[in-house]
Image (tube, grey):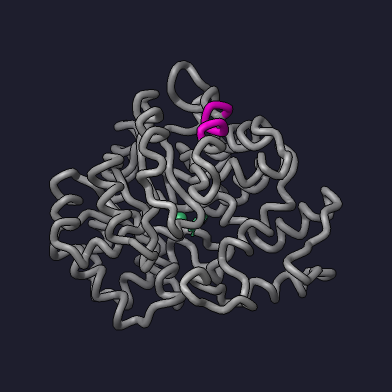
Amino acid sequence: LPISPFIASLPKVELHIHIEGTLQPLLRWTLAQRNNVPLKFKQQTYLTYQELLESYKVTYNHRPELGGRKDVPTFLEAYLAGCEVLLREEDFYDLAMDYLKRCQAMHVRYVEPFFDIQAHTRRGVAAGAVLNGYLRAQRDGAARYGVKSQWIFCFLRDEPVEDGEAAYEAALPWATCKGGHGLFHAVGLASNAYERPPILFKKAFARARADGLHLTTHCDFGQKDTHEHIRQAIFDLGVERIDHGLDALDRDELVEGLKTRGVGLTLCPHAYHRRTATGALFPKLRQLLDKGVKYCINSDDPAYMHDVWIDGNQEKAYHHGGLSKADMVQLGRNAVEMSWADESVKGSIY
Ligand code: ADE
Ligand code: ZN
C-alpha cells in the first residue's frame, strides 16, 4: 500500500515500537561483520546479504503453543536471533540512531521506544552498554534529527519475575526518577504472553509506580486468556496504557474499564493484519472510535513485519478502516494525549 501524501505529511508520535524490532537487514549485516558474529538462525547460516534479506520475507508462525506449525519460526525467535549482533555500546547507539533518523523522515516528532534489556544481559552484554548506547542516541537523536524520545523498560514476561526485578534494579540509575540519567520514564511487559498473565508482575509494577515511573503492558491480539489479561492490566496492575488490547472490544466491562480509567490502546494494525482477514480486523478500528475508546496507531516491530512502519500502519487504518482525514488527525492527537511527554513537547506537535 503506497503512503499517501496526507499520511506522509502528518506530524506523528509513536508509542509502541520495540527498538530491537527496528533492526534492519543492512545494519544487522554491518554489525555482524563489525563484531565478527555469524548470522545463524536455527539450522541455517546466512552467508550472503541476499540470503539474510530473503529470511525477512517469511511469515512467522503465530501461537505455536496453541497448535501452530513447529517448522516455521515464531516472530520472537526471529527477533531474538537479530539481537545477537548487538554487543557493544556503539551497536545499541547505531541501532537507535538509525531509527531516530528514519523518524525524522516520517515526521515522527516524539517517540517512546521499548527496550528489552534482558534479551541482551542474558547473552552476557553489560547493562551499561545497552543503556549508555540508547542514552547517547536519545541525546544525539534529539539534537541531530529533532526527534525527542523517552524510553520504556520492558520486563520479559516469559523469564522469571525475579530476573526482571534484578534487571530493573540495575537499570534504575538510567531512569528519569531520583536524579537518574533520564533515559526511561516507564515500564512495560513484553515477550511471550502464553500463560504469563500480567498479575505475575503486580509487585514489580507497584515498585516502578512507587519510583515515579509510568506503567503499560502488552495484551496482544488473539492471545490465550486475552480478556483476563486485559482485565488484570486495567484493574489489578492499574496501567495507564495497554499495548494492543484490541480484544477488549469483545467485552462491555473491559470497554467500560478502559474508558472510566482513561486507559488508551497503542494499536499496531499491520501486526494483526499479518494473521487476520481485512474484513475481520479493520471494522474494529471504527467500532473502537464509535465506542469512545482512545487509541493511536503504531508499528510494533517494523523490521520483522515486512518493513511496515508507522506511516504504513496509518495508511492501512486510513485505507481499510473507513476512517476520515479528521479521524486520522484525531488518532494523531490521541497519541500526543496518551504520551507521557512533557507538556512543552505535547504542545509543540500539532
Ligand atoms: N517484544 C518485541 N516485540 C514483541 C511483540 N511483537 N510481541 C511481544 N513481545 C515483543
Ligand atoms: Zn509490541
- In the drawing, does residue 4 fall left or right of residue 157? left
Farthest residue to the top: give it.
Answer: 179
The percent coordinates of residue 143 (x first, y second) are 55, 35
Q: In this view, does 227 lie above or below 217?
A: below
**Secondary structure mostly taken by the magenta-highlighted segment of the chain:** helix
Q: In this view, does 135 lie above or below 234?
A: above
Which span of residues is magenta-colored?
165-170
The residue that appears at 59% across and 51% down in the rendered structure is: 20
The percent coordinates of residue 266 (x first, y second) are 34, 54
Does residue 280 appear in the picture of this structure? yes
- In the drawing, does residue 246 fall left or right of residue 84? left
Does residue 350 appear in the picture of this structure? no
- Res 291 → quadrant: bottom left
The quadrant of the picture showing ligand 2 is bottom left
The percent coordinates of residue 288 (x first, y second) are 20, 64
The percent coordinates of residue 233 (x first, y second) are 30, 47
